[in-house]
Image: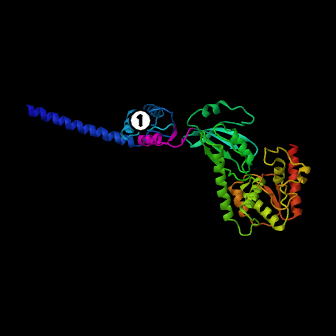
Amino acid sequence: MWRSVASNALTFLIVALFLLGGVILFGQSTYRAEGPLNEPVCVRVQPGSNMSRVSQDLEEKGAIASGTLFRLGADYSDKADKLKAGAFLVPAAASMEKIVDIVTRGGASTCGTEVVYRIGVTRKTVQVRELDPATGSFVEVAAFNPAEDEAPADYTRVHNESDTRYRIAVAEGVTSWQVMDTLNSIELLSGEIERPEEGSLAPDSYEVRVGDTRQSVIDRMQDAQEFLVAAAWESRASDVPLLSPNELLILASIIEKETGVAEERRQVASVFTNRLNRGMRLQTDPTVIYGVTEGVGVLGRGLRQSELRRETPWNTYVIDGLPPTPIANPGRASLEAAANPDTTPYIFFVADGTGGHAFAETLAEHNQNVAAWRKIEAERANQ
């Protein structure tokens, strides 16, 4: 009888172990298998949160089939206590194992909200954007000009959230004063800065964090521009009439201010190169404007005849050769255009009414182009 009981108990134990093993294998397989998500979602992990709250949120979003299995898997992999606060993009069909890795890996948030401080040539704006997980693209939620508008509620809301990301976007052709002025107005940054040298900042997008110093942001911009200038100088054409990287930077800043059409930059560069080679004055309006404003603020009106004749260090209607300093912060494309201009016979250009320019080899051709442009201006004024 005891032998029978022992035999039955042993059989039960073996069956139980077999079933337990099957359950474990099934759990492991489910934990590592593709998840139920049909499209990406953004999951926010609040500071001080835990796996229980995160698994509940994931279940509600349809990202996992079992919160219990999700937590057991996190425990088994020793990641249950390694949650990182932030907003994280969970891709479609992500397994529970993958999601655990995403929310415990750390690093910057990969979705959610970002605030972009845009430094433009004529104005600065603050933009609040939310990532659409389905498309992977940011959607604008709010935008305002901090110099004119009160901050909207959406900005105030996200500004107080710990996982909001911040970027500073610097447009090609802004002045160093404009960058300094904007950085000084961004409250999340700290410390004091002086106006950087004109042309020394690389137009680009820079991610910043709360508490970063303003000087550290300037340092990054200057390091990037130093690299770009050095690369352009190293690759310059052998016959460009420029004697130093600084002269390259000065010419590039003029090209940057003269055209916003990417395809035109090397043509514009060729005009200035041809003029320098012939000993002709550059006669370019942006240098006159810089002589009036010295890079502070925006002129906001047309040039007066008296200003075209006024002697300033930058006015290329009255000085020979290049001005003594850059007149803006040029981007990579303008630096490359200054270093390798097109080969053309042009020594004149004027606006053509399409956003681009009409180029000419002779003064007669140029005068015809100017007349055409004046006609377009008159027609627009009468509309």
In x, y percent, where is residue 98? 44, 43
- Where disc 1 sits, the SS reads loop
Q: Which residue is mark 1?
A: 65
Q: Is residue 79 left or right of residue 220?
A: left
Residue 264 in view = no
Q: Quadrant of the C terminus?
A: top right
Q: Is residue 335 left or right of residue 323?
A: left
In x, y percent, where is residue 371? 89, 55
Q: Taking 153 as reference, is 379 above or below it?
A: below
| Neighbour tally class for label 1: few under 14, some 14-19, many 20 plus, Cα within 10 Å | some
Q: Residue at x 27, y 37 (%)?
A: 20
In this rendered view, identify the residue nearer to me: 374 or 275.
275
Residue 243 in view = yes
Q: Taking 329 as reference, is 238 above or below it?
A: below
In this rendered view, identify the residue nearer to me: 220 or 19.
220
In x, y percent, where is residue 249? 73, 58
In this rendered view, identify the residue nearer to me: 265 or 106.
106
Tell me where residue 283 sits by quadrant. bottom right
Q: Residue at x 39, y 43 (%)?
A: 32
In x, y percent, where is residue 282? 83, 60
Q: Taking 271 as reference, is 110 above or below it?
A: above
Residue type of the residue flagged with mark 1: Ala
Q: Quadrant of the N terminus?
A: top left
- Please provide the residue range marked out in magenta: 86-112
